[in-house]
Amino acid sequence: MSTQSQCQRFRIGYALAPKKGQSLIQPSLLTKASERGIDLIPIDPIKPLVEQGPFDCIVHKLYGPDWTRQLQQFSSQNPNVPIIDSPDSIERLHNRISMLEVVTQLKLHFDNEKFGVPNQVVVSEMKSLTSIEDLKLTFPVIAKPLVADGSVKSHQMYLIFDSQGLESMTAPFVLQEFVNHGGFIFKVYVAGMNVKCVKRKSLPDISEEKLKSLKGFLPFSRISNLIDNDKKVHDDGKKNSQGDEVDLESVEMPSQSFLCELARGMREALGLNLFNFDVMRDARDSNRYLIIDVNYFPGYAKMPGYESIMTDFFLQVLHKSAVGVTE
Ligand SMILES: Nc1ncnc2c1ncn2[C@@H]1O[C@H](COP(=O)(O)OP(=O)(O)OP(=O)(O)O)[C@@H](O)[C@H]1O
Ligand SMILES: O=P(O)(O)O[C@H]1[C@H](OP(=O)(O)O)[C@@H](OP(=O)(O)O)[C@@H](O)[C@@H](O)[C@@H]1OP(=O)(O)O
Ligand SMILES: [Mg+2]
Ligand SMILES: [Mg+2]
């Protein structure tokens, strides 16, 4: 998109929790957006949205019936102003089953790559829990909260090694098979048509040998949320299952065309513009990719060059909206 002429400026309102606003709306983003004709304006969630503005677009990551009502009222008075994204579409990512169902329903085919999700089941109540074999899973498994609503507890997980560990859990939770994947994951950030893949540290592989010595369960949370500054994946044993240290730098990225096509499919199926998804490369088959998590409006500021990517996205939305109006 060319730089906007000085006379034509766009106003994008953003409604974010204070901590999120501070991490995303950095001076570098404000400057980049302004240079390209966009003013990013904070929305006060306490005041009526319809009394704020005018806006050419709204981006948000707030939840709750009152905020949804505010968005509906604003949309009814401003039907041509894009709301990024619709609360109904976002809601699908707040459940760890529905967030991945979309992936299993994608009708995409690639020459080399295979993709899917790990085997998983919902345990709604402990009394229905029988054996791991009945669940058609094998240890180790990961217990993840069924609800992924952004609360701290929605990121609290447990690596489970045996039936004793399983019986220690509190339902409801999703039980997902643990797949060895080399101690790193790919985090694929999507902002409209813009797709950016980064590498992050992950749980280390668990060899059959090591599994024999592991008992009960091991709690963990948000291990892939931080950026590895030294580009190395360090696990507790400092070695992956092959016995050598994993160097993120040496990890080969999946093909960009595969990721872009996967992102396009998810974007259309989810009806969302702003999300990322975590992808593991199966340690047993380097062409097999497993999607394990989809997050709404993630931490884009951790993405290299996020200022240009976000501004490109904003301009694409504004252009589409302007063309839509004249059509
Ligand atoms: N099925 C799996 N097999 C192996 N490792 C896994 C699996 N699922 C999750 N992990 C590891 O646990 C980490 C956290 O899992 P997940 O991404 O589902 O949690 P989250 O709290 O939603 O994370 P985020 O901060 O990305 O939202 C993953 O990044 C990966 O390192
Ligand atoms: O800041 P937020 O509350 O949006 O936290 C999001 C967090 O971004 P940040 O921690 O860098 O900000 C994201 O990390 P990356 O995937 O980008 O690594 C991811 O963990 C999301 O799941 C979180 O959203 P939530 O699931 O909790 O709603
Ligand atoms: Mg994740
Ligand atoms: Mg997540």
Image (spheres, rainbow, N blue to C red):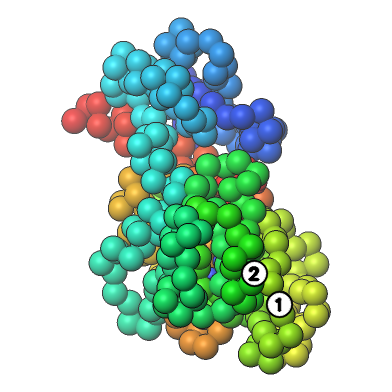
Q: Residue 249's spot in the image, x, y percent?
A: 70, 74
The residue closer to the viewer here, 306 or 227, is 227
Tell me which amino acid carries mark 1: Lys
Figure quadrant of the C terminus? top left
* Badge 2 amino acid: Gly
Instruction: Return the residue nearer the eye: 60 or 100.
Output: 100
Which residue lies under the disc numbered 1? 215
Q: Which residue is mark 2?
A: 165
Q: Which numbered dot is residue 237?
A: none
Nearest to N terminus: mark 2 or mark 1 = 2
Query: Within 10 Å of the Cα at label 2, are there few (<14), some (14-19), or many (20+) other Cα atoms?
Result: some
Secondary structure of the residue carrying tag 2 is helix
Is 177 on the left-hand or right-hand side of 200? left
Residue at image position (52%, 34%) is: 61
Discs 2, 1 touching: Cβ within 8 Å: yes
| The N terminus - image quarter | top left
Instruction: Determine if residue 272 is in view.
Output: no
